[in-house]
Image: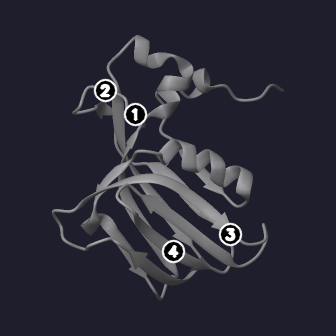
Amino acid sequence: MSDARFEDGDEAPLRLIARDGAGLAVLAALVQDAVLPASEMTFSRPRRRFALMLNRFRWEDEAAGQSARRPYERVKSLLVVDEVLAVRTQGIGRDADTVLSLLDIAFDGPQDGAGRLTLTFAGDGALELAVEALEVTLRDVSQPYVAPSGKAPSHE
């Protein structure tokens, strides 16, 4: 049996779960530069679940060389964090017109225990989720669409 390759997933929607630092690093890379309205975040205290509806840039196309053959794409994706005990925000307004750009996701804590999951956004915004255990799911929920900018995100 061989390892999976980017080419194997060409058009298939992603559905991934991270339960450790290595898995989270993969998810963080895939959601880097995702954009979302601030209104597309929700916390269900009874279910201990925090969810974000993202417009994710398809970085897997870049890694597979797909973008050379077709326009840059985004896809609507649901990022769900389970076992959330508390949510804190910094520099993030809840105004429906506010558009956030996700830069990174990091976990501080033991691999199999409670800790803090930090989502960092452009413009010094951040979400800190106190979690009982690391369990983050990323699932594409739409067909890919041409990125409105027509370009890949870039950082200086």
Identify the mark at residue 108; answer none if there is no mark.
3
- The residue most toward the top is 69
Please name the amino acid that badge 1 sits on.
Ser
Q: Upstream in the sequence, badge 3 or badge 1?
A: 3
**Is residue 148 positioned above or below 31 on the image?**
above
Camera-nearest label, 1 or 4: 1
Residue under label 1: 154
Please name the amino acid that badge 2 sits on.
Lys
Q: CA distance from mark 4 to mark 3?
A: 10 Å
Identify the mark at residue 151; answer none if there is no mark.
2
On the image, the x and y values in percent for residue 50 come to 46, 73
Q: Upstream in the sequence, badge 1 or badge 4?
A: 4
Q: CA distance from mark 3 to mark 2?
A: 33 Å
Badge 3 element: strand
**Is residue 31 positioned above or below 131 on the image?**
above
Q: Upstream in the sequence, badge 4 or badge 3?
A: 3
Q: CA distance from mark 4 to mark 2?
A: 30 Å
Please name the amino acid that badge 3 sits on.
Asp
On the image, the x and y values in percent for residue 116 come to 62, 74
Residue under label 4: 128
Side of 5 relative to 92 (left or right): right
Badge 2 element: loop
Q: Upstream in the sequence, badge 3 or badge 2?
A: 3
Residue at left offset 23%, top offset 31%: 149
Badge 1 element: loop
Q: Are marks 4 and 3 in contact (CB under 8 Å)?
A: no
Residue at left offset 40%, top offset 75%: 90
Residue at left offset 18%, top offset 67%: 96
